[in-house]
Image (cartoon, rainbow, N blue to C red):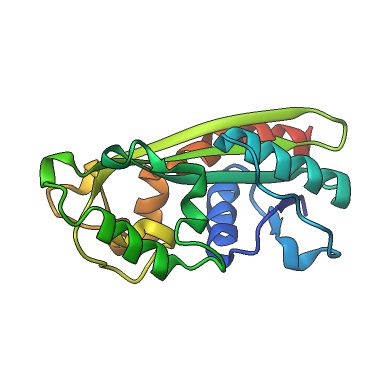
Amino acid sequence: MPEVFLASRNAKKLAEMQRILAEQIPGIVVLGLDDVAHYEEPVEDQPTFEGNALLKARAAVRETGLPSIADDSGLCVDALNQMPGVLSARWSGLPKSDERNNELLLAQLADVPEERRGAHFACAVALCLPGGETHVVHGRMDGRIIREVRGAGGFGYDVVFVADEHAAENLTSAELDPVEKDRISHRGKALRALAPVVAQALTG
C-alpha cells in the first residue's frame, strides 16, 4: 500500500489527512511521528506558514526517506492585526494548550464589537519527495470569533470560530460533521489541492 508521512503527532490531523487523501489514493497509509524512528524536529522559527511547513517537510523527508507532508496553519484575527498567526499554537505560552489559547483569545477580544470580530484560518501544506521535488499549496477559511467556547469536535481554535458558510446556523467548526469541516476548512482545501500531486508522486 502507498505510504506518505505527515510530520505530526496530532491524531485528528492524521485522520483528516487520511480521509482527504483516500479520496484520490484508495488504500493510502498516512504515517505520523509516532510511527517512525524518533528524530529531532526542527524549531518552527520561520515568519510565515509556508516557511514553517517547508522546514518541517524537508526535515521529515531527510529523516524518514518517505514522501513527506507538513503543514503550518493558524488563526488570523482582524482586531489583533492578523495575530496570533504563526504563533497560534503557542499564543498563551508553553507548554502548548488549546484551552489556555482560547481563554486568552476570548479575553483579548472581550470588548471588541461583533462587526470587528472577523478572522480567518490560513494554512500552508508542503510536500517534499525523496528526489528533492517540493510542492506547496495554500488554503483559507473566513469567518468570525464568537464569545464562548462551543463544540466537541475539531481542535485548536475550532471551538470559538464560526465559518462564513455556517454563519446562518451559528455553528462553530467544532460543531460540524468532519466531512463538512473537511469541505470548507483551510486545511481541507489545501489537502485537496495537494492530493493529486501526492497521487502522481506515489503511483507514477
Residue at the image point whose x is 51% and y is 37% from the top = 190
Rendered location of residue 121, percent (x, y) = 39, 43
Which quarter of the figure is the C terminus placed in?
Answer: top right
Residue at the image point whose x is 29% and y is 68% from the top = 151
Res 77 → quadrant: top left
Left/right of residue 141 with respect to residue 202 in the rendered view: left
Vertical order, 125 against 103 (above or below): above
Residue at the image point whose x is 82% and y is 63% from the top = 36
Rendered location of residue 91, percent (x, y) = 46, 56
Rendered location of residue 29, percent (x, y) = 70, 57
Left/right of residue 19 with respect to residue 121 in the rendered view: right
Residue 195 can be seen in this image: no
Left/right of residue 25 with respect to residue 78 in the rendered view: right
Res 175 → quadrant: bottom left
Rendered location of residue 88, percent (x, y) = 47, 51
**Number of residue marks:** 0
Residue 24 can be seen in this image: yes
- Of 200 and 144, nearer the camera is 144
Which quarter of the figure is the N terminus placed in?
Answer: bottom right
